[in-house]
Amino acid sequence: MLKFSFSLVLLAILVIVSPATAQDTKKESKKDKSKTTLVGYLSDCQCGESLESVKMAADHTKECCLMDACAKSGFGIYSDGKFIKFDPKGSDKAKAFLVALKKEKDLKVKVKGKMENNVFMLASIEDAK
């Protein structure tokens, strides 16, 4: 009889805990789906708004991006034929990445984050090559 009672208690716990665990898994899946990965060319916003092609984006230089007026405009990525601005914290990350980068042009990067109100909330940035 004691074994039967213990089994019922154990079964009741499993029934109660299982839906909660399933909901946590669903929440994690939604978080993962909200993350976006983009590959494109890093640029300052001042110049990025005028980029019209992948060739123009690839030819844009680190030196230009780090010029005072250009750097103050923030940063973004030219990807899939359009320029997408980073949020202010993301721009700070992009600038730090750019300062440490050894190459002068062909600033192809892979970024992860999410879009919010036409701004890319940058979580990470790395060299795409």
Image (cartoon, helix red, strand yellow):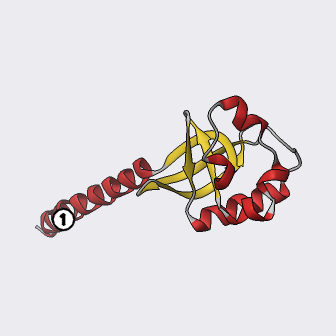
- Looking at the image, residue 75 lies above or below residue 107: below
Q: Is residue 24 left or right of residue 92?
A: left
Query: Residue at coordinates 54% horizontally, 44% vertically from top-left?
Result: 37
Percent of width and height locating residue 109: 69, 43
- Looking at the image, residue 33 lies above or below residue 91: above
Q: Nearer the viewer, residue 9 or 43?
A: 43
Give the amino acid at mark 1.
Ile
Percent of width and height locating residue 20: 25, 63
Total marks shown come to 1
- Classify the position of the C terminus by image quarter: top right
- Looking at the image, residue 77 lies above or below residue 71: above
Q: Which residue lies most toward the left here?
A: 1
Q: Indicate the quadrant where residue 38 lies.
A: top right
Q: Is residue 25 left or right of residue 124?
A: left
Query: Residue at coordinates 27% horizontally, 58% vertically from top-left?
Result: 23
Query: Residue at coordinates 33% horizontally, 58% vertically from top-left?
Result: 27
Q: Is residue 29 left or right of residue 86?
A: left
Q: Nearer the viewer, residue 36 or 59?
A: 59
Percent of width and height locating residue 3: 18, 65
Q: Indicate the quadrant where residue 73 lies.
A: bottom right
Query: Residue at coordinates 77% horizontally, 54% vertically from top-left?
Result: 65
- Classify the position of the N terminus by image quarter: bottom left
Percent of width and height locating residue 10: 21, 64
Mark 1 burial class by Cα count in 10 Å: few <14, some 14-19, many 20+: few
- Kind of element beneath mark 1: helix
The residue labelled by disc 1 is 16
